[in-house]
Amino acid sequence: MFIKPFGWEPWATYPDFGSNNELYAAGDYLEIETLGPLVTLAPGERTTHIERWFLFRDVDTGHSERELYDALLTLLETTDRAISRAPPDIAS
């Protein structure tokens, strides 16, 4: 299972009709692209867009929507704990 958390700023303007993510699928190919808010930068300024990747092996998603929900909730709690323990320069 691949989980890719990333931020969203409710005050921000996003590209492509207000999207903070885009998916593209073709055959066996899937692209998951995250988008940061649109910003205007002066010379020398910079911005960042942070996404984290988590890959979990052998996830049992069960046979019902409830079992899938419970499995995903457990994985999301794991990713939240990992992010909260990251050093400040990585967690921000």
Image: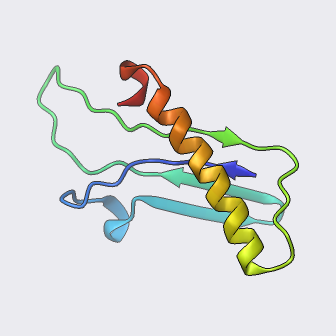
User: Is residue 55 depicted above or below 23 in this figure?
Assistant: above
> Residue 40, position in %: x, y?
15, 42
Examine the image and state in which quarter residue 70 appears: bottom right
27 or 37: nearer the eye? Answer: 37
Q: How many marks?
A: 0
70 or 31: nearer the eye? Answer: 70
Which residue is pictured at 42% across the width and 37% down the height?
A: 50
User: Is residue 69 depicted above or below 51 in this figure?
Assistant: below
For the rendered model, the colour scheme is: rainbow
Which residue is pictured at 77% across the width and 57% down the height?
A: 29
> Residue 83, position in %: x, y?
49, 35
> Residue 36, position in %: x, y?
35, 48
Which residue is pictured at 85% across the width and 59% down the height?
A: 60
**Is 71 left or right of 28, judged from the image as shown?**
left
Give the position of the C terminus as an image quadrant. top left
**Is 17 left or right of 57, judged from the image as shown?**
left
31 or 66: nearer the eye? Answer: 66
